[in-house]
Image (cartoon, grey):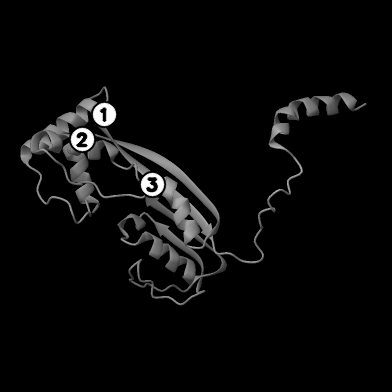
Amino acid sequence: MPTQCVMADEEFLPFRENTFDLVVSSLSMHWVNDLPGALRQIHQVLKPDGVFIGAMVGGETLYELRCSLQLAELEREGGFSPHVSPYTAVTDLGNLLGQAGFSMLTVDVDEIQVNYPGMLEVMSDLQGMGESNCAWNRRSLLHRDTILAAAAIYKEMYGNEDGSVPATFEILYMIGWKPHESQAKPAKRGSATVSFGDLSKINQLQTNTKADKP
């Protein structure tokens, strides 16, 4: 299968409208400044009935590190600035996909915990992954005593019995389709023939049906 490699910015996709049957994004969209705009462009380059499948880092990622640094800065410096990148909440993702024009949406969440010897190892690993804080309004310097205080708070609040500390990574998975006339349409409001209140009677109906059989 012939392939072509193109280096591009997610916020300025260099492709024509209705070009692709499938667009895939894997753990990069948390670096996008204009996420609604990027989703609209992905929707635009998809063909009708094309699908977007993506995974991105979610809002609860590294909450242990975020809370520990905030508490330590408040205690030692009287205020705090963001030292963990901002992430999208799962409750907002469906709305963003819908506003971009996608239909038949699916959003799922997976939570992964990785254990480290301490907070400093967490920060070192993040730096090695190229996932350091991307916020422009952050402080460029963390004082040594603030870092040591944050490490102690991290271990006290979240530490495991074996002395290690967890780091949580929330992964959001999303699927959205570009609308097409062939896709299934939702039933009209008020057209249902079965009440949700009857669901509690299913076991009784099944029992009666079996009893009626010869």
Q: At which x and y percent is residue 165? A: 25, 31
Q: At which x and y percent is residue 1? A: 49, 71
Cα separation, mark 1 vs mark 2, equals: 9 Å
Which of the 4 image quadrants contains residue 125? top left
Residue ID at (48%, 51%): 94
Residue tagged 3:
89
Kind of residue indicated by mark 3: Ala
Residue ID at (25%, 24%): 162
Say what secondary structure mark 3 lies in: loop
Q: Which of marks 1 and 3 is in front?
A: 3
Say if 88 sits above or below 64 in the image. below
Q: Which of marks 1 and 2 is in front?
A: 2
Task: Please say whether residue 42 is visible from this viewpoint.
Answer: yes
Say if 4 sits above or below 95 in the image. below
Task: Please say whether residue 53 is visible from this viewpoint.
Answer: no
In the rendering, which numbered label is found on residue 68? 2
In front of the other: 211 or 43: 43
Residues packed near mark 1 inside 10 Å, few (<14), some (14 to 19) or many (20 plus): some
Cα separation, mark 2 vs mark 3, equals: 20 Å
Say if 95 sits above or below 1 in the image. above
Residue ID at (40%, 61%): 36
Is there a contact, CB below 8 Å, between mark 1 and mark 3? no
Cα separation, mark 1 vs mark 3, equals: 22 Å
Kind of residue indicated by mark 2: Ser
Q: At which x and y percent is residue 42? A: 45, 66
Is there a contact, CB below 8 Å, between mark 1 and mark 2? yes
Which label's residue is closer to the chain start, 1 or 3? 3
Say if 20 sits above or below 123 in the image. below
In the rendering, which numbered label is found on residue 158? 1
